[in-house]
Image (spheres, rainbow, N blue to C red):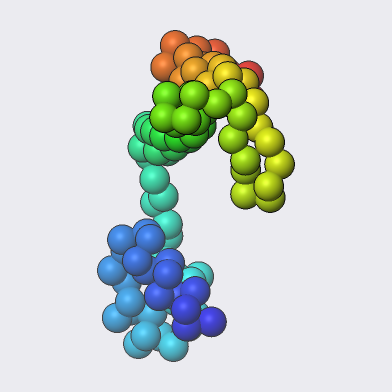
Amino acid sequence: MAYRALFSLISCKCFRFKKAAKKRKHIITNVKCQGMKKKTKRKIKRSGVIITALVVTTTGLIPLVLKNDLFYSNWWGGLVFAPLAIFVGVFLLYLSIFKWKKMEKMK
């Protein structure tokens, strides 16, 4: 229970710890969490999708440029078609840059 109280105090940025300790009540019930703003969450999600798209595109480009090979092996040893990985990465990048508002509305 103590780790929840500490986490809620850190994440909510509320400083009612002393009042809750004096009343000997659970800290979680006394803390009102303000949470993140919607714009901040959107920026974090969008940047995560952009980074993922760049990683996928880069993993497809490396075997094509350095080894002149159309396939590369993934973590489990299976072959992956590099141009398909590039296409998926570029498509994710396109969606995250140009079509992000439409994707948000689809929820």
Q: Residue at x 62, y 40 (%)?
A: 73
Which quarter of the rendering shows the C terminus? top right
Q: Nearer the viewer, residue 89 or 97?
A: 89
Q: Quadrant of residue 58?
A: top left
Residue 27 visible, this angle: yes
Q: Residue at x 64, y 26 (%)?
A: 81
Q: Quadrant of residue 11?
A: bottom left
Q: Residue at x 42, y 60 (%)?
A: 32
Q: Quadrant of residue 40?
A: top left
Q: Position of residue 103 (x, y in %)?
A: 56, 19
Left or right for 12, reference 57: left
Q: Nearer the viewer, residue 65 or 50?
A: 65
Q: Residue at x 42, y 69 (%)?
A: 7
Q: Residue furthest front?
A: 68
Q: Nearer the viewer, residue 105 or 50?
A: 50
Residue 96 visible, this angle: no
Count numbered badges in the picture: 0
Q: Position of residue 89 (x, y in %)?
A: 52, 24
Q: Position of residue 26 (x, y in %)?
A: 49, 80
Q: Nearer the viewer, residue 57 or 34?
A: 57
